[in-house]
Amino acid sequence: MTIRSHSARRTLAVRIEMRLKDCFRRPSDEILRRKQLEKRLTQNSIKFNNAVKILLLGAGESGKTTIIKQMKILHVQNGFSFDERLDKIHDIVENIHESIWTLVEHVAHMNLKYDSKKNESYAKELRKLG
């Protein structure tokens, strides 16, 4: 098939050129914003999935709030100097270890089963450490 008239060839060339320009057009602000949002969502998702999640259960006055405050001392800049936080790290880690050890001991005493082999092996290691 041949295109005979000059104007028809010109029209076809313009159409092809416009389609090619669409392929190489810069992304609009909306597309850039969407990509940035998707990137942030992905980063937040990775952070959330890598975060350690702890469920604190217990009766009133059992120390749940104390543990949260201790986590803040360790991980949040809240008015404590670096040296003050450093001084408390050993006490806090010891408190957390003791609390988890108590839970593991009670699970063993009550003959409860762990939901995974991995958790069971962690509990065995913790009981060995005492």
Image (tube, rainbow, N blue to C red):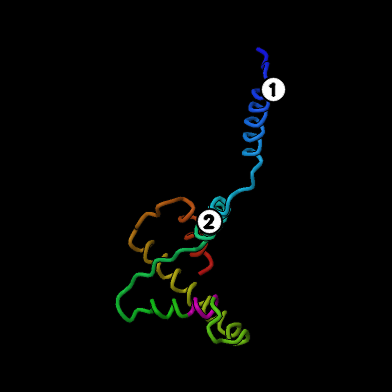
Helix, strand or loop at disc 2? Answer: helix
What residue span does the magenta drawing correspond to?
Answer: 70-75
Residue farthest to the top, as pictured:
1
Amino acid carrying mark 2 in the image = Leu
- Where residue 116 appears, as percent x and y from the top left, is 44, 51
Amino acid carrying mark 1 in the image = His
Above or below, 109 against 20 in this view is: below
- Where residue 45 appears, as percent x and y from the top left, is 51, 56
Q: Which residue is mark 2?
A: 37
Residue at 47 percent of width and 60 percent of height: 123
- Where residue 12 appears, as percent x and y from the top left, is 64, 26
**Magenta part, dominant SS:** helix
**100 and 83: which one is in front?**
83
**52 and 63: which one is in front?**
52
Tell me the distance, in whole angstroms, between the alpha carbons under discs 2 and 1.
Answer: 48 Å
Q: Nearer the viewer, mark 2 or mark 1?
A: 1
Q: Residues within 10 Å of mark 1 (few under 14, many from 20)?
A: few
Residue at 37 percent of width and 66 percent of height: 106
